[in-house]
Each structure stands twice: as C-alpha cells, then as structure tokens.
Amino acid sequence: MYIIPAIDLRGGKCVRLIQGDYHRQINYQDNPVKQAQEFIEQGAEWVHIVDLDGAKVGRPVNADTISAIAALGKLKIEVGGGLRTEQDIKKLLDLGIERVIIGTQAVNDFEWFSDMTKRFPGKVALGLDAKGSHVVTGGWYDEHPKSLLELAREAAVLPIAAIIYTDVAKDGMLAGPNFERTKVLIHTVSVPVVASGGVTTVPDIRKLASLGAAGAIVGRALYEGTLTLTDAITATNNP
C-alpha cells in the first residue's frame, strides 16, 4: 500500500475543508510547491491534489501550481476537482501528472466517463464520495440514486486506474476512516481501491493495509501532526 499526502488548493494556498464545507476551511501552507517539496524530503512518492477552486467553477483553476509541482520531477501526481471535459483532462495529463480523478461528472454522465477511460486508459480514476452507502455529488449535497457498490461495479469493468473512496462524514474529522465499507468495496471490485477520509494514525494505516487497500490519502493528520509522513510510509512496510 502506498501513502498519498494531500494538497488541497484554494486561492493559491494549501487548505483543508472540514467535511467538504467551504465555510469550514483551515489554512496551512501559503506555498503549495514548498509543501510538495517537504513531502518529497519526507519520502513521498505520490501526492493527491484537489483543485477546490476548480471544483466550485467546474474547470481547472490551479493548473499553474499543479504544473510547478509536476516540474519538481519527483512525484506521481493525481489531480481532481472540476474536471468536466476531455480538453481539461488532456491539459492536466500533458503536464505530466500520473492520473486525473473524476467524481461528479463521472456519476452524472457515466457514458461520458466511460468514454474518457477508454480514451485515456489507466490515467483516469473514479472518485466516489459517499454518505453511508450512497454516493453524493455537487459539493456532497446531492445524493445519487445508485449506491456506492453499484457504481463501483459498473466502473470496475472499465480501464480505470483506481477507485478513490471517501466517506464524507469522516473527511477532515481526524476520527479514523470507514474501515467496514472500505473492506466491502475492496472485496466487491477487482480494481485498486484508495481509501480517503479520516486517516489519522499509524494503526489506521496498518488496518487499511491489512484490508488490501492499494493506497491511503492522508491530509489533515499530516498538517496537524497526529501522523508523520515518515511513520505512515514505514507502517505500510511493517503492517
């Protein structure tokens, strides 16, 4: 299992939103490129970037910052937030990132998402944000009629890179991930599942590894010191 430290971009800064609420923002680092460099020095091989400005307007906004992080040449980068068109996907992939994450647009227009996975095989991950068993979109306010597992099964037959699963009730809460639903998802599909939301401690990392998660995204815990990136990476090697 690999560890993916998170950088959420808003207004050119690293921030975290509590449960995805734009009105509950914590500011951390004014220089995202510097933050990425610190992650590299601590052993990171991946970084998870969310363009929060892009998610709000429906198109990438922080491409220059993402490009500067990619130019460091040391990280595999996954990027989500506001991806709605093939042109925007190509623009980000052309920067040299490893994969894009598509959530709302994938759920709302699955036919389009399916087409994008075939145009960019292995370069598109599905972001599934859920409250309980149901997927939510539109800033986590709109509940989709299909369940998390239904959408995961439909996506798993496509040439996707991974499923990024976030329990929105856990996100930014420093209260541990949803282990049970993560386990069910991993056992339901054959594609890699990356866990996100609430990953806080070394035991969290070890348990996710034992469940068979391909990766774990860690955000607020790193910024607030409940978990160090070095310890998280070490835990994946010593589950």
Image (cartoon, grey):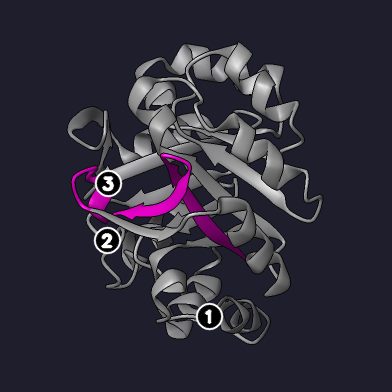
Q: Nearer the viewer, mark 1 or mark 2?
A: 1
Q: Nearer the viewer, residue 22 or 239?
A: 22
Could you say which is closer to the camera, residue 169 or residue 226?
A: 226
Residue bearing mark 3: 20
Residue 75 locus on image (x, y percent): 74, 54
Q: Which mark is residue 118?
A: none
Residue found at the far right of this picture: 73
As drawn, the label of residue 170 is 2
> What residue is shown with label 1?
228
**Circle 1: residue type:** Thr
Query: Which comes sooner in the sequence, label 1 or label 2?
Result: 2
Residue 228 picture location, percent across and down: 53, 80
Report the mark closest to the observer, 2 or 3: 3
* Residue 195, percent from left and from top: 46, 58
Give the secondary structure at mark 2.
loop
Which image quadrant is residue 82 in? top left
Name the residue located 61 percent from the left edge and 54 percent from the top edge: 47
In the image, residue 14 sits, relative to residue 178, either above or below, namely: above
The amino acid at mark 3 is Gly
Mark 1 vs mark 2, CA separation in Å? 19 Å
Secondary structure type for disc 3 = helix
- Element assignment for label 1: loop
Span highlighted in magenta in the image: 1-24
Q: Amino acid at mark 2?
A: Lys
CB atoms at circles 1 and 2 under 8 Å apart? no
